[in-house]
Image (spheres, rainbow, N blue to C red):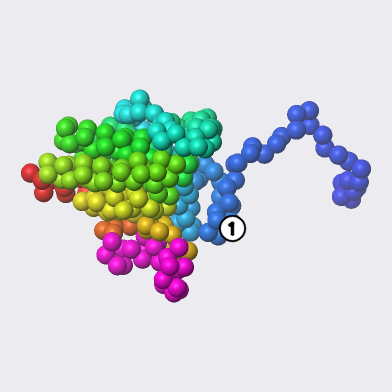
Amino acid sequence: MSWFERKGINIVTKSPKEMPEGIWVKVPATGETIHRRELEENCWVDPVSGYHFPIGSEEYFHLLFDGGKYSELGQHIQPVDPLAFEDRKKYNKRLKDTQKKTGLSDAVRVGTGKLREKNVVVACMDFRFIGGSMGSVVGERIGLAIDHAREKKKPLIIISQSGGARMMESVLSLMQMAKTSAKLGLLHEEKVPYISVMTNPTTGGVTASFAMLGDFNIAEPGALIGFAGPRVIRQTIGRDLPDGFQTSEYLLEHGFLDFIVSRNKMKRRLSRLLKILAHDMK
């Protein structure tokens, strides 16, 4: 039975094999791990718990546009420091550092292409860029998306993912709420469909403007949606909040949403809604 005795024997290879970094991903909702490839194939949704991992604009574009093909609008609109605050050097540095880190020029991108053979305009926010905060560039690009949809009679889809207004731009960031809302009013007059998709989180001025103005308001499961955060509301009113307050499920129950749709079913549901809206608009 000498083959049981392996003392002092070490197996050595010429080139040690190492586990690729990030190949396994921990699911915050369960603490379990899942293979990265399985997550990618399921649109970054955990198939067991249904937990939706945060993704960026590129991933959403790849999910919604046929073949992942689209043309981008508004890249020429770049952020600046319009108010020249005393700490403007910090803001300018943060802009440059975030652009370098994320590869994004600002917190929203606009793409045009086909969704199941239907021409659409999709504006998608990206939380990685200063918390998806809405500044002048975000408002201008959203406005550009609305204008393009109105002129070309293409349905508009806006995917929101934001912590609110970008306060480094002060009142100019707040003005974007009125601008985007007014442009959506013009879109409605032209009877061009607009579907709002809210992801985790959608808060602040984004919720108080274009995110809640869709012909259909949709959210991903478990998304935090609201104006002020739960902590601020609790401190203001001096009362405990209901369980699940400001989650997409709570908002659906209280009539603020039309649907909750899992990300891996989002394209199919959007396609169906666009067909219904196209029929009603004739």
Mark 1 lies on residue:
31
Residue positioned most to the top: 76
Q: Nearer the viewer, residue 178 or 67?
A: 178
Decide: is 1 above or below 76.
below
Name the residue rendered at 35%, 41% in the picture.
172
Residue at 17 percent across and 32 percent down: it is: 152
In the rendered structure, which segment of residues is drawn in magenta?
A: 232-256
Query: Left or right: 183 with respect to 133?
Result: left
Query: In this view, which residue lies farthest toward the front?
Result: 86
Q: Is residue 137 left or right of residue 188?
A: right
Task: Give me the residue at 38% from left, 40% from top.
Answer: 135
Q: Position of residue 226 (x, y in %)?
A: 37, 58
Q: Position of residue 45 (x, y in %)?
A: 45, 50
- Residue 42: x %, y % from top left: 44, 46
Which quadrant holds the C terminus? Answer: top left
Direction from residue 211 to residue 151 in the image, left or right: left
Q: Is residue 248 magenta?
A: yes
Q: Nearer the viewer, residue 2 or 255?
A: 255
